[in-house]
Amino acid sequence: MIIDVIIDIFPKKEVLNPETEAVKKTLSNLGYKNIDELVLSKQIKLSFKNLNEEDCLYQSKLMCDQILVNTNIQDYEISLLKKD
């Protein structure tokens, strides 16, 4: 069995993200005035084989905490998708 893991990484709410602010301002200048919230994020997809769900989650969390995510300024969410 193969399990796909999707990791969504996004800035913490309390951290000002200059890129997000620039995009939001540009959209406003283009006439998109009704945007209340804008979040720029990135997504990482991993595929694991021969592991159970618990181990996939555990390894994914370790990877996030060790290298994939700057936990000082970013949060993340992990989702699992099973494939046969």
Image (tube, helix red, strand yellow):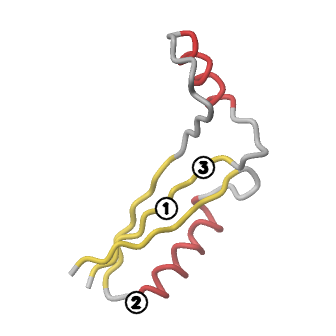
Of residues 79 and 65, the one nearer the viewer is: 79
For the residue carrying disc 1, how many other residues have a C-alpha within 10 Å: few (<14), some (14-19), or many (20+)? many
Residue 77, position as x, y percentages in the image: 56, 63
Of residues 15 and 36, the one nearer the viewer is: 36
- The secondary structure type at the circle numbered 1 is strand
Q: Counting residues from the N terminus, which is met first, the one under dot 2 or under dot 3? A: 3
**Measured along the vertical axis of the image, is residue 23 above or below residue 50?**
above
The part of the image, by quadrant, that contains residue 58 is: bottom right
The span from disc 2 to disc 1 (Cα, nearest Å) is: 17 Å
- The secondary structure type at the circle numbered 2 is loop
Q: Which residue is mark 2?
A: 52
Residue 80, position as x, y percentages in the image: 41, 73
Q: Which residue is mark 1?
A: 7
Q: Which residue is mark 3?
A: 10
Which residue is depicted at the point 69% across and 35% down? 17
Q: Which amino acid lies under the numbered mark 1 shown in the image of this protein?
A: Ile
Which residue is depicted at the point 31% across and 82% down? 49
Which residue is depicted at the point 66% across and 26% down? 21
- The secondary structure type at the circle numbered 3 is strand
The span from disc 2 to disc 3 (Cα, nearest Å) is: 26 Å
* Marks 2 and 1 in Cβ contact (< 8 Å): no
Q: Please give left or right for residue 8 compared with residue 52 in the image.
A: right
Which residue is depicted at the point 62% across and 29% down? 19
Of residues 37 and 40, the one nearer the viewer is: 37
Q: Please give left or right for residue 58 compared with residue 71 in the image.
A: left
* Marks 2 and 3 in Cβ contact (< 8 Å): no
The span from disc 1 to disc 3 (Cα, nearest Å) is: 10 Å
Q: Please give left or right for residue 49 compared with residue 5 in the image.
A: left
Q: Which amino acid lies under the numbered mark 2 shown in the image of this protein?
A: Asn
